[in-house]
Image: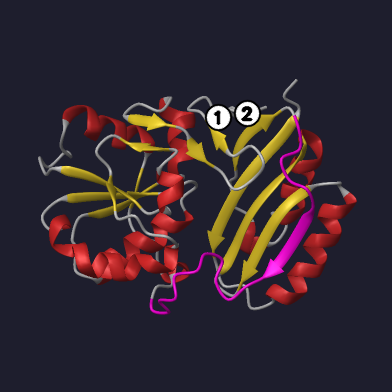
Amino acid sequence: MNDILNISAYKFVPLPDAHALRDRLHEQAEALDLKGTVLLAEEGINLFLAGPGEAVRTFMAQLRQDPRLADLTPKESWSARQPFRKMLVKVKREIIRMNHPTIRPAQGRAPAVAAATVKRWLDQGHDDAGRPVVTLDTRNAFEVDHGTFEGAIDWRIQKFSDFPAALKGHRAELQDKTVVSFCTGGIRCEKAALLMQEAGLDHVYQLEGGILKYFEETGGAHYRGSCFVFDEREALGSDLNALKQ
């Protein structure tokens, strides 16, 4: 019986009080017997949590009482068992490490494109202006090996902080194309899209909600394989169920 609710969510928003938030969120999560990881930084929050549905929704309601996080919308999936071993709340320099300090999503997001629109573009082979569309996988190579979009560009990066150098070496192949950057849940492709804009690419989008939202809204059309997740489930199919239960 799938009665464990798994959520992931992030938001780039200034959190100068990240250290104070850490203690409060850890106490709230422990009280609800949740497990997972919450990352906090001055640039925002990134979380992966699991537990009984009511407990998870209570935690999210508490989190949204902070006006800065009131619009936090998690992606959801269900599993038969708890995929995390403990509850961690950490303060980091970045909620997703890129080592490129000029990229600050809280100051303005890159344009996002909805899953249904990406599916339509891939169905027709071009965007609505007739430009060729390419999908750019911003995940690590071992994640890509579990599954990715048909024909996706994969630079075989080993960690996300390798992305700026990879872009510098491959920028020319993206010129004059509509580029849809994607990742598991949206956080990496958001920073990647901003970096590509900074590099002078004009038609760059992030896939809103990442692969998990794409699975939820389209059933995984044009995607081959599974989506790696950083917990004991290891990988999810396009129905958002773990391949190993």
Magenta stretch, residue numbers:
81-102
In the rendering, at what x and y percent does residue 18 appear? 68, 73
* Amino acid, disc 2: Lys
In the rendering, at what x and y percent does residue 5 appear? 71, 35
* Amino acid, disc 1: Leu
Say which of 25 and 242 sits in front: 242
| Quadrant (top left/top right/bottom left/bottom right) for the N terminus | top right
Neighbours of disc 1 within 10 Å: few (<14), some (14-19), many (20+): many
Q: Which residue shows up at 17% across the image and 56% down it? A: 174
- Per the image, is 83 magenta? yes
Say which of 59 and 142 sits in front: 142
Question: Helix or strand or loop: what does disc 1 sit on?
Answer: loop
In the displayed structure image, the side of residue 25 where residue 169 appears, left or right = left
Q: CA distance from mark 2 to mark 1?
A: 12 Å
Number of marks in the image? 2
In the rendering, at what x and y percent does residue 91 appear? 68, 72
Which of the 4 image quadrants contains residue 145? top left
In the rendering, at what x and y percent does residue 219 appear? 43, 24
- Which of the labelled discs sits on residue 31, or is there none? none
| In contact (CB < 8 Å): disc 2 and disc 1 | no
Say which of 95 and 81 sits in front: 81
Residue holding disc 1: 240
In the displayed structure image, the side of residue 241 where residue 79 appears, left or right = right
Q: Which residue shows up at 23% across the image and 51% down it? A: 179
Discs 2/1, front: 2
Q: Which residue shows up at 72% across the image and 48% down it? A: 60
Residue holding disc 2: 244
Q: Which residue shows up at 74% across the image and 41% down it? A: 57
Question: Helix or strand or loop: what does disc 2 sit on?
Answer: loop
